[in-house]
Each structure stands twice: as structure tokens, then as C-alpha cells.
Amino acid sequence: MAKKKKEVPLTGITVSKEEDFSGWYTELINKAELADIRYNIKGFVVYREWATITIRKMYRKYEDLLEKKGHLPLTMPSLIPESNFKLEAAHVEGFAPEVFWVTEAGSSGKLSERLALRPTSETALYKMYAMWIRSYKDLPYKRYLSCQVWRYEGKMTRPFFRGREFHWIESHNVFATMEGAMEQVKEDMETTYQMLQDECCIPIIFFQRPEWDKFAGAVHTYAADALMGSGKVLQLPSTHLLGQNFSKPFNVNFVDTDGKEKYGYQTCYGPAQSRNYGAMIAYLGDDKGLILPFDLAPIQIIVIPILFKGKEQPVLKKANEILERLKQNYSVKIDISDESVGSKFYYWELRGVPIRIEIGPKDLEKNQLVLVKRHDGEKVIVKEADLENIVEEIAQNYTKEIKEKSLMDFESQIECVYEKDAAIEAINNGKIVCCGFCSIDHDGERCAEVVEKEIGGEVRGKRVDEEKHEFATCLICGKPASCTIYIARSY
Amino acid sequence: MAKKKKEVPLTGITVSKEEDFSGWYTELINKAELADIRYNIKGFVVYREWATITIRKMYRKYEDLLEKKGHLPLTMPSLIPESNFKLEAAHVEGFAPEVFWVTEAGSSGKLSERLALRPTSETALYKMYAMWIRSYKDLPYKRYLSCQVWRYEGKMTRPFFRGREFHWIESHNVFATMEGAMEQVKEDMETTYQMLQDECCIPIIFFQRPEWDKFAGAVHTYAADALMGSGKVLQLPSTHLLGQNFSKPFNVNFVDTDGKEKYGYQTCYGPAQSRNYGAMIAYLGDDKGLILPFDLAPIQIIVIPILFKGKEQPVLKKANEILERLKQNYSVKIDISDESVGSKFYYWELRGVPIRIEIGPKDLEKNQLVLVKRHDGEKVIVKEADLENIVEEIAQNYTKEIKEKSLMDFESQIECVYEKDAAIEAINNGKIVCCGFCSIDHDGERCAEVVEKEIGGEVRGKRVDEEKHEFATCLICGKPASCTIYIARSY
């Protein structure tokens, strides 16, 4: 039986997120003017103003965090010669189906070598690392790029989730030892928690991906899955232990303290992606529209004067005073357009502005203001003199409050199962399944195929942070379990 | 007769800027590790850490300034369908010889339509503007992109000056009237002065480019030329009055207050380019290396403890104290590497760190520090208690001092001439020539060809800010002069 359709205001989003996530997301993207899919190349999307500003804020936070941890920025060309691209065999095999090729230029026609639009930068960068890194004194060598990549994806485009061109940050690091590299992987996971959970309020779990699902060319891949509700996960940043798989073909070596030349141990990590933004707005949003962490909102406070004929002037004057008082410390705007007050409320709620300040003639008489918090709708009546203090208090707590709510039912999404039928039922009920498994090495790949076919989810891998559960046998083949894995449907 | 070769220290730059600008610039780029031209695609250059950080600082200043003036950021795909690209005839004619084409993708092979790597974004963006702009209420419509562009240039690559991929900001604006558009052009020129002269200390002149040298598709082009010394100019940002040349083929129209549908009047402007960085380091640098405006230096203060055997600890302790005291307000670093003190001085001078703080055992005894300003070499002995005040004072004045020096001999580079021979002599003496000219419309193109062939410079156009001189006749054809123009050699 269909659930009863919720009443949603016509001026806001007309589809309920709970009932139809896809329809809701599409309407959110369109009505809040976050992206435009009408650009006339398939899979290429325009990110509009509101999204561009928040994504930029996210990236700057990432850049600051990476630089605090000793990474430095570089700027690399976007094109990679086919000859570089082919140096690491597993890498080229993994990425070749997704590469856009530049083959012609200007009036001179065909180029002598095809140039790849980078799908990722290893094969561009490591040629340079080979020239730049000389001795153990240069290590650890920690760099990053803020750039875009292109992938000729077959799957359906969904703005910010998946497209054929997307922006990201990729960090590429070289160490003298495998242990050093593994420490970096741990640091990367910590960075991911800091950014995604603390700043973006998205609950994540880190998984060591199974052998058959790792980054092309990596020894191991550790990827964050966001729990998006209703049992579906979305892959977010991943960090890859490359070992010497690239340093050997690309000749990334160094003279060690003992005077001997050795190959470096490498890692790479894609902390920031447009997809993080997609995950954030999808996870936090509600039927009124966006909910944004305070720091990431393009406008943090909207002042709405409530004007009655003949009484406009004193209210407008006060509203502008409020604007002036707050604009030193916050991104604040006043809405004096011709729209009705109700439309203005919807408009800024849709865009997730954290604080709305209303001021009308009656408030003016009482020297008060009405503050409304977007994320929980709470209304606060504030004495004018207390404005700065109350706004600061709200600003301090706003993101924390969103985060607490969003992490609350984190573990309740997971169900431990001991039989295949229970797994099927759990997946159908929108849960993430936790169970015993024979192996995430190549040996386990056949069982993983069964999981996909019969249970209808994917093996996401072995949880990195902890293994709470002990299982004696593999859910599929019944052989002794070597690990606990998680199964989920994914975006 | 060759000038006497200046003595330059072996650890610094070995070529004198005055004697061999090209050699000096190349050595600066290599020794300060600003760029690497060894990337294995012709014309594509890697920007290294030190350059990337300063360029990012420049771009953020530009972005802030543009947003203060009402522009909002957007993110556009990098690829443009050939069909879009062909919509404006003059534009495609101008840019076609410089386009890189994507023709293949993945394993599916040939694409059905060639995709241009954007050489500039008009033909991508204006398709969207046609959908986004509806009414006069949407105008003025002021947007910008921070992105990179690709141009299959024939001329020689010089890092930051010219390459086949470069980063820039491009702003694209729509107005209801031609007057509105022209006001924007004026605002753009003002923005350019604010950034290039005030922030980057580069002297510029704005010229209205002659008809034969304007942006492909523009009504008029206004371009900033930097005076690089020795009579050579470098084209920096330009702003273009597009009128309705693009709005008609791209259907960028709006419903006006009178209810009628009208085509918008457009402008576009490329304020920030990697080239601005090139111009800045080339213009300000000296034989010791980089000189950078205070705000744009990746590290603003370098603390160098001068260590003598057995006396290391108290000096190191004090140096670290200094670091802690300053790092709240400045980007500051301590150099405790194994290198000699002299090498450290050269290293940080080469990289243009504005303030060096030296502290040795004797300074410790006297409770003093030695501060050295990079741009003029001035040494200041500072009582430890006064440190913050003195540093703040230097920080406040540093960029101003560079700017005063760099703007000082601005006008002395220009020479007014009344005869062709005098023009030839002036150009050979490294001057910029100012003279009468028949016309910068198409009528003047033949005289401009004579200028190039016989005088050895290019017609840069009509100066926008003022016309100081009155000339009766054209320097070349002798017909009545319609304007005053400037002739210079260019990079």
C-alpha cells in the first residue's frame, strides 16, 4: 500500500524526500538553482553560483587542513601523453575505458601522440617526482593538486554525485618505507573524518575495499562510504596504498641514508570531490530544501524586513542597521525584493540560509527581533541589544546540532546476519548488512558475485575502525570466515 | 661594446637581469623552483609549490574584489561542442587555429561531435545565459569563472608568460543598454589598476586596441600593457565590449520594462591570468631573485637562528619563541636545516621572503634581533620587546615601498616622436613611442603594417586614461591624425 502523500507547499519542493529520494533531489537541484544539466554535452553539468560558493568553501577548508599536515600545492597540466599513461599496467587497464582523448589541434590537424584528459594524475605527476626527488632528505614528500578530472562514465549522470567532469583534490605522497606510507593512509582517514563528519555532518565508515574493487594500480584501497539512509551507501574519499607499484615503472627513487638508491613507497588520496557536496546536501536536506553547516553556507544570515504600507521607513532603517551590525562577522544579506514575505521565507529556506532575522513594525515597538534557525525551525525572540550574543551562540552551535542529529541513528542502519535469507530481507528493508566472509582477497571474488546476484548488494569491504562482530563462517560458501564484511546497495 | 659583466654570487642567480633578461628569467624560474618545463608535452608547464601559492593568493584577492563588485562565481564544463563554438563567425575564425579537440573517448572510440577544450568560455556560457536570463530584473547579470583554458599557441613557451594551458579568471556580464556595458568596461579597468598596480606593483597603461587587434567577436577591446622596462610591453588583462555580437546568435535576450523582448549588451573580461604572476616576478625581481608584495609571499617572515657549537640551545629556544610570537598574524617559518647561514640567506632571498629575522648568541645577550627587508636590503636592529610593532610597521609599508619604486620611472619610458626616423631610434633605445596616427579603425591597418616592418614595434592602440599629446599628422602616411597611439615591442 502506498504511504499517504505528505502535504508539501507548492512554492517549496513538491516531492517528499522520504517517499521519492530521486525526485526530491532533482527538484532540490533545480529549484535551489544548484546545477543545470541542460549543458549540451552528455554527462557535463554546470554548477551554479550557490553550489560553487559552498564547494569553494569546502575546498579551502581541505586545502588548509592538508597544508597544516605538511602537504604543499602544485599545478599540473590537464593532459597526459598516452605513453606516460601506459607505464603502469593495472592502472591503464582500469582507466582506459574512461579516458577522453585529445587527438587534434588547431589547423595543423592530427597530433603525433594522443593526449589523455587526466582521469587522475598519477601518471602525469610521477614522471616529475622522478626528477624532483633525490635523497632521503626530500622525504616524506607530500603534495596535492586542486583540479578537475574527466571520466567517460557509462552510468547515469546525477549532478554532484556522478558526471563526466568533476572537481577534486588529489594528494600524492612518497615515503622511505612502507610503514611511513601506511601512516599516511591513517592520517588521510583521520582527515576525511575531520572534514566529512565534523565539517559536513555526513556519517561515514571506512572500508578496506576487496581486492577486486581497489584503485587500479594500488596495493590496497581504503574508501569512505557515506550512509545515505534507506540502506544505500555512496563512495566518498578514498586513500590508496600504492607501495612501489608506481615508483618502479616511473622511477621514483631516492638515495637513502646508507648511500643506496631505493624506490619510494607511495600513497594517493582523493579527499575532496564535488560528490562530497552532493552527499552533504542529499543527506542533510529536508522537504523545505537545503540544510547547510554554518561555515559552508554562502549566506549565513538573511534579514527580512516585514513591511506594511506607510510604515516601511522605520522598519527598513532598522533592518539595514541590523545588517551593518552583523556584516563584520558573518555573510549576511537583506531581502528587499518585491516578493511576498512568505515567498521570501521559502526562497531562503530552500537555499539553506542558517539564520533568518525577521523584523516588522511590532518588533520595532518592542525593540525585538525574531530569529529562526533553518535546521530545526526553532524561533527565538531576541532583544535588540542581545543580537550579537545570540547570533554568535547560534553560529557556534548550529553545525554541532546538525551533526548530532545526523550521527544519531548511524549504527541503527546496520544489521548483523548469519544466513543468506536474513541478508536478503535486511537489504530489502533498507539496511546495511554485516556478516562473515571467506576472504576479500581474490579467493573471495566468486562469493562476492553471489552476493551481488542473490542478495542484491555489493561487498563494501572490511571495516577499518573496528570489527565488532565475530562470525565463524562465510555467509555465502560456509567456509571459515577470515573477516567481517559489509554489504550494501550503492549510488 | 659589451657592458662590464656584474659580479653575481654563484649560489644565487648567475645572470644579470639588466644584461640578459631572458637568461635571468629562466634561471630565476629554475633556481627558485617556480615552474618546470620538462613536462613531456610541448607547451605545457608544471607550476611548482611556491608559484602555486602566490598565484592562489592573487586569485583569491581577485575573486573577493569581483564579488564585492557584484559578480558571482560559476563552474562550467571545460569542453565546448563544436556546434556552439561556431555560432559567432568572427569568434570561431579568431580561435579555430588555437583549439585542441577531443575526438575520442573510452573504448567506444570516435565521438559524434568534436569537443573543443575551451580556449575561452563565451560559447559555452552564453548558451546557458540564454536559458537563465528572463527579464530586466535579472540585469545586470555579472558572473565569473575561475578556470583554465587551452590554446594551441605557435609562439615559444615561457613559463607564466605563454603556454598552451593557463589559469585565469573570466567575467561575463549582460546589461540592458550599451551604456551599462560601457560602465562595466570602466569598472573592469579600475579593477585591473587595483589589482595590478596596487597589489602586484606592476605599472600598466590601458589601451583601446586597434580594430585589427581586438578580441575575436568584440566591438572594442581595452587591454592593459605592462611596461616591462627596456621598451618592451606585455599584454595583461583585457576587457571587451561585446555589444550584441554574441547576444544575437546565442539568443541572450530579456523582457524589458516595456514588455518587449530585447537582446542584451555584453562584456567579458579576463582579469587574472598566470601571466600576471609572470609579469610581477619579472618586473619586480632583481639579481638576488624574487621580490614579492608582502601579502602575496607564501612565507612572509623567515627566522634564521645563527648557531655556534655549544651555544645552540638558547639561540634555538629564542628563535622558536619568535616564531610563536609572530605566527598568529603572519606566515612565518624557521630554517633549522644543516645548510650554512650564507646559503640560507641566499635561499630565502631567491624566493623573495619579505622579512628575514636573524638571531645569534650576541643578539641574545643584547635582547635584540636583526631584521632584513628583502626588497631594499635594509637592516634594522630591533629590541626584542619591540618586535611585533616593528614587524607590523614593515608589513604595512613593504608593498607601498615596492610600488613607489616601480611606478617612479613609469613615464620616462615613453618618448613622443614626430618623424619615422626618430621613432626607429627611440624603439632601438628601448623606449615606448607615442605619436600621431591616421586611424585605429580598419583604415589604419596598412600604416600599422608599416610600423611593424619599418619601425620594429607594434601599434598598441589609443591610451584610455588620457591623451597628453596632440599630433597633427599620422607618423606613417602623413594624413591628418585622428588619434595618438603608442608603439612598442612586446613579449
Image (cartoon, coloured by chain):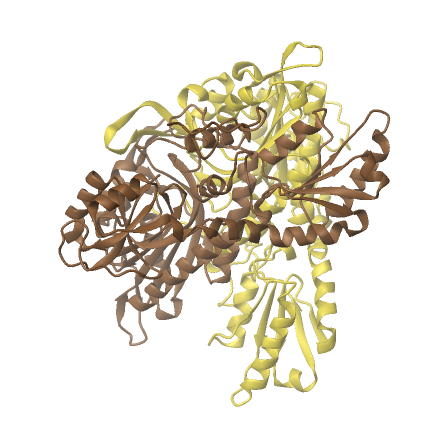
Chain colours: A brown, B yellow
When asked about the image quadrant of residue A299, the answer is top right
Please state the horizontal and vertical placement of residue B436, each as a whole percent of the image.
Answer: 70, 26
Give the position of the N terminus of chain A as an image quadrant.
Answer: top left
Q: Is residue A311 left or right of residue A149?
A: right
Left or right: B350 with respect to A192? Answer: right
Q: Tell me: B84 left or right of B352.
A: left
Residue farthest toward the bottom in the current orientation of the protein: B310
Tell me which residue sits at (51%, 28%) in the image: A30
- In which quadrant is the C terminus of chain A drawn? top left
| The image quarter in which residue A206 lies | bottom left
In which quarter of the view is residue A263 placed? bottom left
Q: Is residue A83 visible?
A: no
Nearest the camera: B201 or B86?
A: B86
User: Which is nearer the eye, A119 or B120?
Assistant: A119
User: Can you say whether A393 is above or below A24 in the image?
Assistant: below
Tell me which residue sits at (23%, 50%) in the image: A88
Q: Nearer the viewer, residue B359 or B372?
A: B359
In the picture as drawn, the residue positioned furthest to the front comes out as A1
Left or right relative to A420: residue B364:
right
Residue B321 visible to the viewer: yes
Numbered circles on residues, count: 0
Residue B203: percent from the left, percent from the top? 67, 44
B436 above or below B359? above
Q: Position of residue B88 (x, y in %)?
A: 50, 18
Percent position of residue A364, x then y: 83, 39
Of residues B14 and A11, the one nearer the viewer is A11
